[in-house]
Structure formats: C-alpha cells, structure tokens
Image: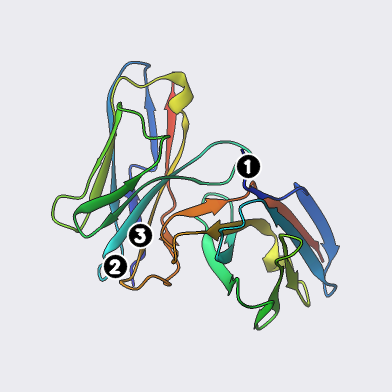
Amino acid sequence: DTGVSQNPRHKITKRGQNVTFRCDPISEHNRLYWYRQTLGQGPEFLTYFQNEAQLEKSRLLSDRFSAERPKGSFSTLEIQRTEQGDSAMYLCASSGGTDYQPQHFGDGTRLSIL
Amino acid sequence: DQQVKQNSPSLSVQEGRISILNCDYTNSMFDYFLWYKKYPAEGPTFLISISSIKDKNEDGRFTVFLNKSAKHLSLHIVPSQPGDSAVYFCAATDSGGYQKVTFGTGTKLQVIP
C-alpha cells in the first residue's frame, strides 16, 4: 500500500494562468474524490469518480474547473484562468469498491495565486 | 451553511486524561458519521466511524458516541497521548455510503506531556 500520491505538492502561479494537478490513488481503489480545503475550514467535496465515470460534482466546481480520470486509474484536476479565491489545499482521496470503505487521503497540493 | 459544526477550535488535555471532542450536525439525513485525524502537512487519516443506527462505537482508545435526538456526536480518547496531538475533523455522509462526505471545521487537540 503506497498510499495516495499527489503532485505537485506546491504550485505557485499568477492569476489568470491554468494549472493542473495529478492524483494517483491506491492501486486497487476504484473510487476517487477531490476536495478543497481553505484555511480554518474542513475539506469541501468537489467531485467523485467511480472508475472512469464522474458520478457527482459539487456546485463549488465552477466551469473553470474540470476533472478527469481517463482510464480509471490516475486523475487530473485542472483549473483554468485561476483567481485569487482558488488559493487552497486541493486534496485527493480514494476508496475501495464497497460503499462503506473509508476514504484514504493524499497529502494534498497547495495552490497559491499571486 | 455549515451542516457539521465543531464549535471548539482547540482543546488542551494532560497526557493520560480523557479528551472529548464534540460535533453537532443539522442535516437529519446524515446516516454515517466519521472522525478523521490530521497532522500538519499531511492529509486526513480515517480514525473511526459510526452508523446512525448505533449510539456507540469503540476502537481501542477511541470511542464515538452518537445522540441522534440531539444531533450530536462526540469522540472520546482515553488515555490521551502526546501523539494524539492533531486536528480532528468530524464528518458525515447522507449518500448511503461514504462517498460524499461533509466535514466540520476541525478541533485542534494538544496533549500536554
């Protein structure tokens, strides 16, 4: 069990630029989740995949955000035309095939918008 | 609106004593409740969970109590150890499983040696 891996760990970019984060889940996990965490808050659900299918998206996921999981393995989260308010920790989690398996989190990608 | 509330941002406890972390929720459709622990620069780690049909679940030093009528749950850690110092998140789900999880704002626990 190598855990959930997220890259990069930190990303600093200028407002208006596009950024992409990658998440590699635990290999046998078919469910993958993205969360956003801002200072003083808990993680907020963004979206969820089962295999390659994106099953749910939060209203927090504006049209500037897109997530993919092309082959049901790793996932990418892209933010286009970044804004100051996008500065946050982006967390990825994965879980096994049944409904009651707890989610295992990666260490996150911290995004800072200049 | 904050559906899961942790009203105590921080808590300090002496080593060996009991730590009690509290959580309130507003959504009566929540059917599973979870606690996660988070160390600095790491992602949250699952600790313990409880179904809404139970009122207590125990795992070693950790016990979670659920009071559905009060929409309140608590995490007890006995005895507290310095390694328990972390941020604890209360979380809940109403999706019939653990898929879409709603987190509270966290309580920072400091266990003093």
Name the secondary structure under disc 2.
loop
Q: Are marks 1 and 2 in contact (CB under 8 Å)?
A: no
Please check whether the numbered discs 1 and 2 fall on a single chain.
no
Q: Which residue is drawn at 78% across and 49% down?
A: B8
Q: Calculate the distance from the C-alpha at mark 3 to the C-alpha at mark 2.
A: 10 Å
Q: How crowded is mark 1: few (under 14 residues within 10 Å), some or many (20 or more)?
A: few
Residue marked by disc 1:
B2
Q: Which residue is drawn at 59% across and 36% down?
A: A39
**At which x and y percent is residue A74?**
22, 54
Disc 2 marks which amino acid? His
Name the secondary structure under disc 3.
loop
Between residue A22 and residue A62, name the one nearer to us.
Answer: A62
Q: From what the image shows, is residue B100 above or below residue A59? A: below
Q: Which numbered mark, 3 or 2, is in the foreground of this view?
A: 2
Apparent side of residue A102 relative to residue A20 in the rendered image (left or right): right
Name the secondary structure under disc 1.
loop
Number of on-image labels: 3
Q: Calculate the distance from the C-alpha at mark 1 to the C-alpha at mark 2.
A: 30 Å
Please check whether the numbered discs 3 and 1 fall on a single chain.
no
Residue marked by disc 2:
A29
Disc 1 marks which amino acid? Gln
Q: Do the residues labelled 3 and 2 touch (CB within 8 Å)?
A: no
Q: Calculate the distance from the C-alpha at mark 3 to the C-alpha at mark 1.
A: 28 Å
In the rendered image, which quarter contains the N terminus of chain B? top right
Q: Tell me the quarter of the picture where residue A14 sits.
A: top left
Q: Which numbered mark, 3 or 1, is in the foreground of this view?
A: 1
Q: Residue A4 carries which label?
A: 3
Q: Which numbered mark, 1 or 2, is in the foreground of this view?
A: 1
